[in-house]
């Protein structure tokens, strides 16, 4: 009887332990399910975050009632929408909006479309450029070794980007904002993007470099010292329309052979009118038609691009290699002030854009005097 009692006690203990093990297994299964559910929800939240953050950003812009900066240097300043991580979705919205402004500038000008693009983190952007070559010489063989003259040594200079701050300050009336059938703010932001883009084109093409980018067309000079310094492009002697065939062809010989691959002619409308009428000795047009979008024609085997912002000039070379547009993706700033003007909301939108000479040997320019126009 005593042995049987001990056996029953052991059996009861095993059953109890088995039940505890099963309970632990159940708890582990529940925890596993909960973890998987939490992970799935977190993944869904992360994937949806860029869209949600973007919507929240625009909602903040629309509904904010203070005078403090919403956005500065890529950081959203409203307390209810705080972004500290520059790689977050909120910062991505700033980058996206700013790049749309730069893209709008490129859409406005055939010349600006050809420029290269670089990204900077601040307005202190600069690069080093080599001036001159190391040099080489011929040395006699099987002769007494002597210390000959040194070959030349290269020099270096620092090229700095010139930036400008483009600002738009539109005003919307309270009536327009309250119109349920017209999204005034969305319309305004799209218009601001276009206007800032056009202002950027003006700066990139003809900017003076003082509180604005240094314009591409302002960097052409006949002063050889500036060309040798790497800061300016070479400007050839002026051409008369009667000599345009020879001078256009001569521009090719101003570039080193490596720059001819992918080179283009960019000219103003008035010069293009003359080029389109040029004929060879048999009366056939020198310019061939082109089916490529954005290319007005071809001459001497090179594409012709016509830019409406130019007058009486023609450029030739690799523009993406010669000149760079420098953008700061996180430079967008936006203010919304509903108190400055009664029953109106004033917006202040600003962005920074710059330019820098990349390789001044990649392009040459020429003025065409007394161009006839229709």
Image (tube, helix red, strand yellow):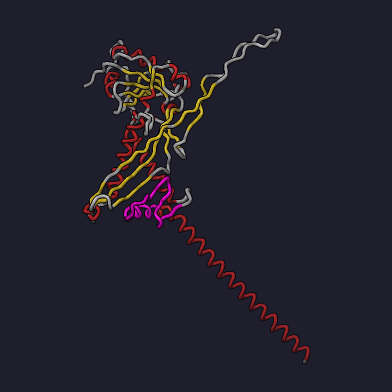
Region of the chain picked out in magenta, as a range: 54-83
Extreme bottom residue here? 1
Residue 74 is left or right of residue 289, and the answer is right
Extreme top residue here? 143
Residue 120 on image: x %, y %: 46, 38
Q: Residue at x 36, y 14 (%)?
A: 237
Asked if residue 184 shows in the view, the reply is no
Extreme front residue here? 340
Q: Residue at x 49, y 60 (%)?
A: 42
Figure quadrant of residue 372: top left
Tell me the quarter of the image containing the N terminus: bottom right
Q: Identify whether 240 is placed above or below 105.
A: above
Residue 337 on image: x %, y %: 30, 51
Residue 374 on image: x %, y %: 21, 22
Q: Nearer the viewer, residue 240 or 151?
A: 151
Residue 234 is left or right of residue 312, and the answer is right
Q: Nearer the viewer, residue 282 or 61?
A: 61
Residue 196 is left or right of residue 94, and the answer is left
Q: Identify whether 135 is placed above or below 12.
A: above
Q: Identify whether 275 is placed above or below 340.
A: above
Figure quadrant of residue 327: top left
């Amino acid at each position: 009887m005593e042995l049987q009692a001990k056996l029953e006690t052991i059996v009861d203990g095993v059953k109890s332990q088995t039940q505890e093990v099963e309970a632990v297994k159940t708890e582990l299964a529940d925890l596993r399910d909960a973890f998987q559910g939490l992970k799935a929800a977190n993944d869904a939240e992360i994937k949806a975050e860029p869209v949600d953050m973007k919507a929240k950003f625009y909602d903040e812009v629309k509904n904010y009632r203070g005078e403090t900066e919403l956005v500065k240097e890529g950081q959203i300043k409203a307390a209810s929408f705080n972004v500290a991580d520059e790689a977050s979705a909120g910062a991505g919205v700033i980058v996206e909006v700013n790049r749309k402004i730069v893209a709008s500038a490129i859409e406005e000008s055939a010349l600006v479309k050809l420029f290269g693009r670089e990204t900077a983190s601040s307005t202190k952007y600069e690069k080093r450029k080599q001036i001159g070559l190391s040099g080489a010489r011929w040395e006699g063989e099987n002769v007494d070794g002597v210390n000959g003259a040194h070959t030349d040594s290269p020099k270096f200079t620092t090229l700095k980007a010139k930036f400008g701050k483009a600002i738009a300050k539109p005003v919307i009336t309270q009536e327009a904002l309250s119109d349920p059938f017209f999204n005034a703010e969305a319309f305004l932001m799209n218009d601001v993007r276009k206007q800032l883009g056009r202002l950027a084109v003006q700066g990139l093409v003809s900017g003076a470099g003082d509180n604005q980018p240094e314009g591409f067309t302002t960097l052409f000079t006949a002063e050889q010292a500036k060309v040798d310094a790497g800061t300016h492009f070479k400007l050839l002697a002026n051409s008369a329309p009667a000599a345009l065939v020879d001078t256009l062809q001569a521009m090719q010989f101003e570039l080193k052979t490596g720059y001819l691959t992918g080179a283009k002619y960019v000219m103003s409308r008035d010069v293009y009118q003359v080029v389109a009428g040029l004929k060879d000795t048999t009366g056939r047009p020198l310019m061939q038609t082109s089916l490529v979008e954005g290319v007005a024609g071809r001459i001497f085997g090179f594409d012709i691009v016509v830019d409406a912002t130019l007058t009486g000039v023609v450029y030739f070379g690799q523009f993406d290699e010669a000149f760079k547009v420098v953008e700061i993706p996180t430079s967008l700033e936006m203010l919304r002030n509903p108190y400055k003007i009664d029953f109106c909301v004033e917006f202040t939108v600003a962005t920074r854009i710059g330019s820098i000479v990349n390789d001044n040997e990649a392009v040459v320019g020429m003025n065409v005097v007394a161009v006839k126009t229709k």
